[in-house]
Image (cartoon, helix red, strand yellow):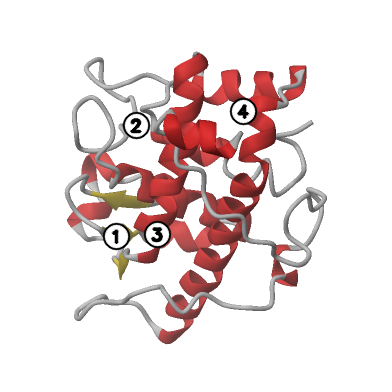
Amino acid sequence: MKDLLRNAGVILPSIVLLAGCSGADSTEDPSAISSVSEKASFPSGNGCTSSQQSTIRSDETLAQAYLDAIGNQAFNVLFNTTPNSTQRLNQNFRPGPIENYFVFNTYNAIRFNLSSTGYFCRTATHSDCTGDFSTAYARTDKASSQVRLCPSYFTLARVSRARVLIHEASHQNRNSESGVGTDDGYRPEEYQFPSVHNAFGYEFYSNLCYDGLCWP
């Protein structure tokens, strides 16, 4: 069956088993993940304190665990469908038969993007976090692999911060019809949620497999 997926152009993520992660109960403390991402990059001028860098590395580790859990369940969600798994996909992506594959290929791309993302920490007065973006937790230009984190990002719970990192990494994907990644759907010309081209779907769905809620 996996060969069938490959022949159809579907790239399923490599299955990585993380102790205490896949299928974990939604009440599990994410701090149970002991390893911390060493991939998180902080380019020159990033503005992040040592404490913020430590937080971001921890958040990225949890985001990676979410993506690994999705990889572990991708085959079941695609081929051993249940009313629950179908409903979860529809709620977040409104997919059709072909777009189901698109969703999981996009998560595979998000995993790649996350591993090459550079993080910058902004102040409350920085242009990335003021004006139209005064309520933003983070910002990413679609053509960039740089994520700018606003002060409000650090006020979120760890689960929410990890989901935000996945949201931002999805913007970097060059797989939408516009060729530059997901949109947020705030303007009429952008893809509205739910859609396979909207970043919020990838954010909201990202922890469901980890929590044991995407299948069955």
Mark 1 or mark 4, whichever is nearer to me: 4
Residue 174 place in picture, x, y as percent: 24, 40
Q: Mark 1 points at which residue?
A: 148
Mark 3 or mark 1, whichever is nearer to me: 3
In 3D space, how far apart are the residues under numbered discs 2 and 3 (Cα atoms)? 18 Å
Residue 129 place in picture, x, y as percent: 28, 53
Q: Name the residue under label 3.
A: 114
Mark 2 or mark 4, whichever is nearer to me: 4
Residue 184's label in the rendered image is 2
Q: Inspect this view and state whether residue 184 appears.
A: yes
Residue in front for this viewpoint, 164 or 212? 212
Residue in front for this viewpoint, 156 or 9? 9
Give the mark, 3 or 1, whose residue is nearer the N terminus.
3
Residue count near mark 4 (Cα–Cα under 10 Å), binned few <14, some 14–19, many ≥20:
some
Residue 78's label in the rendered image is 4
Give the mark, 2 or 1, whose residue is nearer the N terminus.
1
Q: In which quarter of the image is the N terminus?
A: top right
Q: What element carries label 2?
A: loop
Q: What element carries label 4?
A: helix
Please, what is the three-letter code of the amino acid marked with disc 4? Answer: Leu
Residue 126's image quarter? bottom left
- The residue sitting at 32% across, 65% down in the picture is 116
- The residue sitting at 43% across, 38% down in the picture is 105
Give the mark, 2 or 3, whose residue is nearer the N terminus.
3
Residue 43 place in picture, x, y as percent: 24, 77
In 3D space, how far apart are the residues under numbered discs 2 and 4 (Cα atoms)? 25 Å
Residue count near mark 2 (Cα–Cα under 10 Å), binned few <14, some 14–19, many ≥20:
some
1 lies above or below 56: above
Please, what is the three-letter code of the amino acid marked with disc 2? Answer: Asp
Q: What element carries label 1?
A: strand
Please, what is the three-letter code of the amino acid marked with disc 3? Answer: Leu
